[in-house]
Image (cartoon, rainbow, N blue to C red):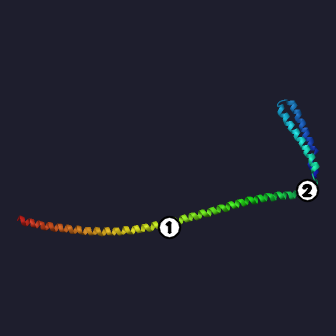
Amino acid sequence: MTSQTKLKDPRNEKSVKIQLKAMEERETEKGKGGERWNAAIANLSEMATNLESLQKLLVKKAVYVDDETFAKASLSSEQARTIKALEQRVETLERELDAAISAAARARSEKRQAEAGQKAAELRALEITKELENTTKVFELHMEELRAKQEEISKRDKEIKLLEAIIQTLGGKESRSTIG
């Protein structure tokens, strides 16, 4: 089938006209919803007229080529559409790549910030550990001092009790000697 026969097929025109006549006959038989059917039929008639005008215009303005040239043109057209689709896909992929690169850069930045935060926390933990060790050493020194003072107090307490016992012993002898 050549491109000329593709553009105009008298069977299609006759088919449309026959369908329109059949619809008009059904409309007159039913008699209900006449206005809507009349409007629909008018639209279809107008479309048929427009289709005929378009076919006539195409026949006058159309360039007829042999099948080989038509096949080459079709191939070129298909390739152009494919190229356009591929270019759009490339643009989409480039946008996705840019977005992925940006996301990776943000992730690296966040990772660096997290690492810096972790390092700061580790340093703070070391400082606190050293501070606790120093506090522990000071506490141990104070405890040793307190033990030494406790021992000294305990020793003096024993000396005082000894002296009290001596005083009581001496005091008891004196009171016996004054009584007797």
The label nearer to you, 1 versus 2, is 1
The C terminus lies in which quarter of the figure? Answer: bottom left
Say which residue appears at 89% left-offset and 57% top-offset.
Answer: 73
Mark 1, Cα crowd under 10 Å, few <14 / some 14-19 / many 20+, is: few
Towards the viewer: 173 or 136:
136
Amino acid found under the numbered disc labelled 2: Phe
31 shown above or below 51: above
The tally of labels here is 2
Q: Position of residue 66 (x, y in %)?
A: 94, 56
Task: Give the spatial CA distance, label 1 vs label 2.
Answer: 78 Å
What mark, if any, has residue 71 been given in the picture? Answer: none
Amino acid found under the numbered disc labelled 1: Leu
Residue farthest to the left? 180
Say which residue appears at 43% left-offset and 67% top-offset.
Answer: 131
Residue identifier under label 2: 70
Q: Position of residue 98 (x, y in %)?
A: 69, 61
Sequence-wise, which precedes: disc 1 or disc 2?
Answer: 2
Q: Position of residue 157 (x, y in %)?
A: 23, 67
Towards the viewer: 103 or 19:
103
Towards the viewer: 85 or 105:
105
Left or right, 10 with respect to 87, comes to: right
Left or right, 144 with respect to 22, comes to: left
Say which residue appears at 39% left-offset and 69% top-offset.
Answer: 137
Which of the 4 quarters of the picture holds residue 41?
Answer: top right
Mark 2, Cα crowd under 10 Å, few <14 / some 14-19 / many 20+, is: some
Which of the 4 quarters of the picture holds residue 143?
Answer: bottom left
Secondary structure at badge 1 equals: helix
Secondary structure at badge 2 equals: helix
What mark, if any, has residue 123 been given in the picture? Answer: 1
Q: Position of residue 142 (x, y in %)?
A: 34, 68
